[in-house]
Amino acid sequence: MTDTKKLTVLVVDGGGRGSALVDKYSQSPLVEKIIAVPGNDLMVLTSKKPVEIYPELKTTSVSEIIEICQKEKVDLVDVAQDNAVAVGLVNELNKNNIPTFGPTQQAGQLEWDKSWSRQFMQKYQLPIPEFHVFDNPESGYQFLDSISDRPWFIKASGLAEGKGVIPANNNSEAKDAIAEMSRFGQSGQTYLLEEWLVGEEFSAFAVVDGSDFQIVGFAQDHKRVNNGDQGPNTGGMGCVSNPLIVDQNVITQVKDIFQKTVSGMVTENRSYQGILYLGGMVVGQKVYIIEFNCRWGDPETQVVLPAIKNDLVDICFSVINHTLSSQEIITDSQTRIVVTVASRGYPINYDAVKGKQIFGLEKILNSPKVKLLGAGTQYQNNKFIAHGGRLFYLVASGENIIAARKNVYDELSNISIEGNNLHYRTDIGWRDVARLNNENK
């Protein structure tokens, strides 16, 4: 951007990912004001620039978002949330000539339709597990009856807030999981049975301008709610970047996957612009695609984004203008960790925690050791109040995972919710800690 006019940026998201984006945009000398839909209270408290939030709106409130853009003369919209991509918010913003960072509804089908996505990957010879697509329970049951017993993952084809994947140890459990698909409504009407791969997961993030891409970071999420990767899947209980599982062999394969995907989307007339998130698994020495997401991850954004040294505004406009190849995205070499702090009972039932006071956050608002990013925490009458499942995030960095972990857990020990209702994992980054300890033996 060479224009001297100070910009107004609108971020479409309300959780930790949106908070990390607001924080990054607030560091840009090009930005004067940030709007977040729906946003959260901690964005307003922690940002270096003025932030206006619209908590009564949803990320899918298309006409209202366009109205805000026109009224506030918004210069850039960052569509960071999956449901917003799926309803075609980017398409509508483009029709109204509002500069937008994010994929169209057609390109976003890579995420919002898992069956289409798998068939795309198969067509372009990308490395994927065996999969089978069904659109009613009976056909899935019949298939399972016709083959030998084995473990599966059963996946709702549509969006399900990160919770539409059920592991099954055998064909009988797989049938139970198929019956569960109905609770995801339309999203679970079509579902997939996928081979249960055994390996180590990671995620990779690339900025894509339609034809060119640059990888900007890697992370490793911890999806289960309890230590030791136990309990139900969540939207993510914490993350590290860059994980040690990602070596040169993995990077080489990931580059090939991104290249084939970006080229394939051009061939399909669904040119992809925005952030493309590869959920991968290393099995032996081979990388498999678990999924694609068509936006930043949550909580991965909280650790990947701070490593980027470039102005995020410049990156966005290089994508919008198809000039990504003219700039080099530079990242630092710090290790980062984020811990998701949740209400006790998350992700099943945390209603009893809503309205309870959170203590200790005021002491870390300006901590030199950690960055506080908001989600389901409200700020009322100078008090922090629990209002959701994932409440807030603490991010810390260090020369390695052990140093970064110490910073974040030292600060977390000073935070509580009345009635002992705080929940977080104390083992985020455990794989890399084990690797480092083994190296030092």
Image (cartoon, grey):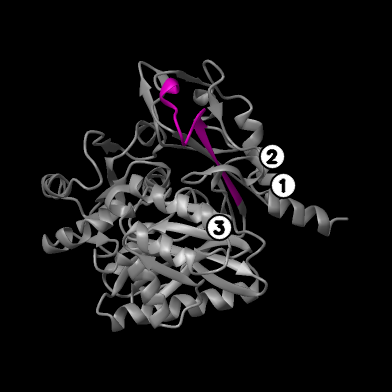
Q: Secondary structure at mark 1?
A: helix
Name the kind of residue labelled 1 in the image.
Answer: Ile
Q: Which residue is mark 3?
A: 219
* Nearer to the camera, 14 or 4: 14
The nearer-to-camera label among 2 and 3 is 3
Q: Estimate how packed mark 2 is, as few (under 14), some (14 to 19) or many (20 or more) residues with alpha carbons within 10 Å.
A: some
As drawn, is 386 to the left or to the right of 67? right
Residue 136 location, x and y as percent? Answer: 32, 59
The nearer-to-camera label among 3 and 1 is 3
Name the kind of residue labelled 3 in the image.
Answer: Ala
Q: Can you see residue 414? A: yes
Quarter of the image where one finds residue 258? bottom left
The tag on residue 402 is 1
User: Which residues fall within the magenta stretch?
Assistant: 336-353
Q: Give me the C-alpha separation between circle 3 and circle 1.
A: 16 Å
As drawn, is 93 to the left or to the right of 246? left
